[in-house]
Each structure stands twice: as structure tokens, then as C-alpha cells.
Image (spheres, rainbow, N blue to C red):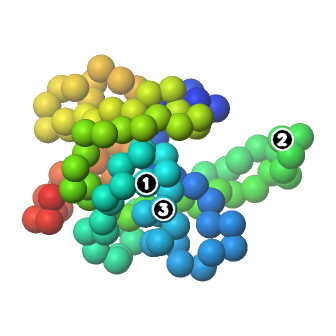
Amino acid sequence: MHHKKLDKWLQPGGHCDGDSNILNVAVKEAIEESGINEIKTINKEIFDIDTHYMPRTHKEPAHYHYDVRFLLKTVNNDNFIKNNESNELKWFNFSDDSKLAIELERSVTRMIEKFMTINHPAC
């Protein structure tokens, strides 16, 4: 998704807001941010953790932010419903050169490379 506030292509995600089941939060956020109702987990293991520094804003002090990422899959993936957090939603085929046409965050390209390396059989 192209994140409206950050002006970057990122994976869907959100904050746990007190929910200790981070896998359920990841699925819930993916559903909310994509509009795709049937999103399932590939497995329950954490796929990636990205830690990055967030500078102070008028709302929050400076802090480290932890993105905990899971591998998810869709059953029917053509029916995006864009929400107010994104400018655009689209699928990319990362086995060809389409990924070169957009600028991705390093943490996103790292996940793609990791996924391509393990070549997960569930997808």
C-alpha cells in the first residue's frame, strides 16, 4: 500500500493498542487496510522484525518502533477497498522487474529478498 501520511510503499500494518496477540493484530490490520476479507496466516512464526528510530513529534517523544511481520496469504485478492490511510493499493510481481519501477523502503525489499530466498511452499 502507498501510505498516505508517510508517502511510501509499505506493507499493511498497525499498532497493537494493548492486544497481546500480535498475529491476530497483523491479520486484522491487513484486512482493514486492504478491504480483502479472507486473509489467512501462512504460519504463526514471526517472519521479520524491523526496528527503526522515530524522532520526536508534537504528539510523541522520540522512540524506537518495532514492526513485527508475519507471512499472510489471501484467498481472493482482487477486491481492494482503499481506506483513508493509503493513496493506492496494488499487487506487485517481485519475480520480474516491476519492483524497479517503484521506490521501496529497505525493510520491505529485505522481506522480499528473504521470502524469495526461502521460496515458501505455501504461496
Q: Which amino acid does label 1 sit on?
A: Ile
Amino acid under disc 2: Thr
Which amino acid type is shown beneath numbered disc 3? Lys
Mark 3 Cα shell of 10 Å, populated few (<14), some (14-19), many (≥20): some
- The residue shown at (50%, 56%) is 29
| Viewer-side residue, 4 vs 56 | 4
Secondary structure at badge 1 equals helix
Decide which of 10, 48 is in the foreground and name it. Answer: 10
Q: Where is residue 31 in the image (x, y as percent from the top left)?
A: 43, 54
Q: Which residue bears the numbered disc 1?
A: 31
- Disc 2 target residue: 57
Does residue 1 appear left or right of residue 22 in this picture? left
Of tags 2 and 1, which is closer to the observer?
1
Report the quarter where the N terminus lies: top left
Q: Label 2's element?
A: loop
Q: In this view, does 29 lie to the left or right of 89?
A: right
Q: Earlier in the sequence, mark 2 or mark 3?
A: 3
Q: Is residue 5 above or below residue 18?
A: above
Q: In which quarter of the image is residue 43?
A: bottom left
Q: Is residue 14 visible?
A: yes
Q: Position of residue 44 (x, y in %)?
A: 34, 77
User: Residue 95, percent across and down?
Assistant: 14, 38
Q: Give yes or no for contact between labels 1 and 3 (Cβ–Cβ under 8 Å).
A: yes
Q: Residues within 10 Å of mark 2 (few under 14, many from 20)?
A: few
